[in-house]
Image: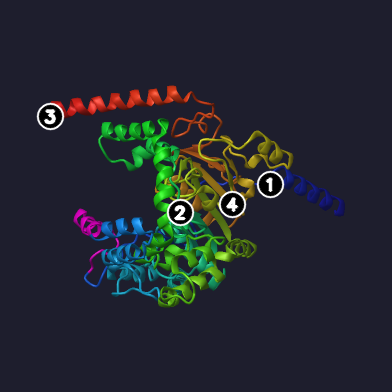
Amino acid sequence: MKKLISVLLAVIMVFGFIVPAFAVPLEKRSKYPIVYFRGNSEDIVDEDGNVVYDFDVEGEDIKQIAKKVLPLFAKGYLTNDFDEYYKVFGEEMSKLYDRCMLDGNGDPKYGTGISQAQKDANFTEMNTDYANENGKYSIVSYDFANDWRLDPLKTVDDVDKYIDGILKVTGKEKVSLACKCLGGDLILAYLAKYGTKKIHAVCFGSTVAFGGDLVNDTFSGHMKVNGEGISRFANDVFLKKVFINMDEVIGQFISETASLAYEAGIADGASDVFMKYLYNRLYGGLVPALATATYGTWPGYWTMVTADRYEETKAFVFGDENSEKYQYYSGLIEKLDNYDKVVRQRIPEILKSAEADGVNICIVSKYGFQMPPVIESLDEQGDVWTTTRFSSLGATVSKIGTTLSDEYIESRKALGLEKYISPDKQIDASTCVFPEYTWFIKNAVHDDWTKEEDWIITTVCGSDERITVDSIDERPQFLVYDRENDKVSPMTKENGSTESYDVDQKPKNKLLSALTALFKWFTVLNQLIKRWLKK
């Protein structure tokens, strides 16, 4: 009998090494209730129910501000003293954004927040069992509404009460947490403050909670304008379909104008002039003034600043600790410092601790697009709103329009990490904090929420087993999104090699390129003129 048991154990061990993963089907529903955090999609309203954060700035508002600040800018340019310009510009912008700004303590100034209807929905959800006939829950069964501007470490007190209500009404012992975009800050804050006792799984979809480049770069003054980036952004075929809701010919004219400006050297020349003579002279005073006049009073947005940039960014926006500005915002800064200490500096530690406690983890990251061509990370791969290295929590990613070098790939192969290299050779997932739990979707922008993405998250949220990138046969680690057919497929060398813009890494004949761009520009201009004359 002992020999038989030994043989069986040996077989099990060998089988375990040969087949390290198990196959599971994608699930549309979870056996555990899923508490879902949307990010900043919730309406923020005033006491009369009017939305206060849509920032629909009227042209007349801009004209009035321009009348006041342009003379001060001219004066500052001549005297090299822009202090008055910064002050007045900041004051005028504060008036424009006043209803949605927070005060010096990081609290609503006029009692603004989510609507009463949203508060009522939270109450109803936490007291209702939304299980279907099979006792399972969808990803939006429990859709927690919150004021995403506020301190996440305070908001999660309400989240914990919400979870307690769900556990009581459903009879479950645990819930799963899932998020999109900014909602990841609530998951991290909850784990840091309340631990994992009530949590079965945590899933992050295209989150900016690990770092959001637009805020991370702009709040810290790391801006950059680049002619090639502008041309590439304007000519991206997917971005034009997603973001340019305009006449096709007009859209093409914009693209060809950007291409011509780049190929002729105009864009880079103008970019250099802008950075040297304007931005580099102004950013030290202008950016902090605009930050505290608009989004810089929101603790929720500060969660997008990365651990290595926080102290630098805080000093840049608020100034010296003894300054009047710093003292006014001392209550807000206390909240920001607390989040930095409790959450931001400990993100990998918090999640690894959760994993050790048996919590399932899932991270979905997107790539294939460059970042907006006005920030330092403009040539990095991302989903337009955040770079893939941030949203994946550590992937090594090639620059936009390139691949990882052959030498790098060979070095990873030598370490036995070849499986983590994407078929298009642009992603190395082995450097992620959780390479086994991180999926990538190419050609999906930040706002593309595919059903397959939701199903991966739901599968992880509902499984009693540890789900890895090898567990779901039809949804491996690297995927490609086909926007025309709204379909996600496993990536191959064939379907993963098509970029969303023309990639040419060979040396170019600059004169020929410029003449070609000029010809295309005149061709499209001719179409516009003919249309105008016909009308």
- Badge number at residue 394: 4
- Label 4 to label 1, Cα distance in Å? 24 Å
CA separation, marks 2 and 1?
25 Å
Residue bearing mark 3: 535
Element carrying mark 1? loop
**Mark 3: few, some, or many residues within 10 Å (few <14, many ≥20)?**
few
Alpha-carbon distance for marks 3 and 4? 54 Å
Q: Quadrant of the C terminus?
A: top left
For discs 4 and 2, the disc positioned in front in the rendered view: 4
Q: Amino acid at mark 4?
A: Gly
Residue at image position (21%, 59%) is 64
**Mark-to-mark CA distance, 4 and 2:** 29 Å
- State the count of labels: 4
Q: Earlier in the sequence, mark 2 or mark 3?
A: 2
Sequence-first tag of 4 and 2 = 2
Query: How far across and how far down the image is residue 125, in percent?
Result: 37, 67
Q: Looking at the picture, which amino acid does disc 2 mark?
A: Arg
Label 4: which secondary element: loop
Q: Which residue is mark 2?
A: 29
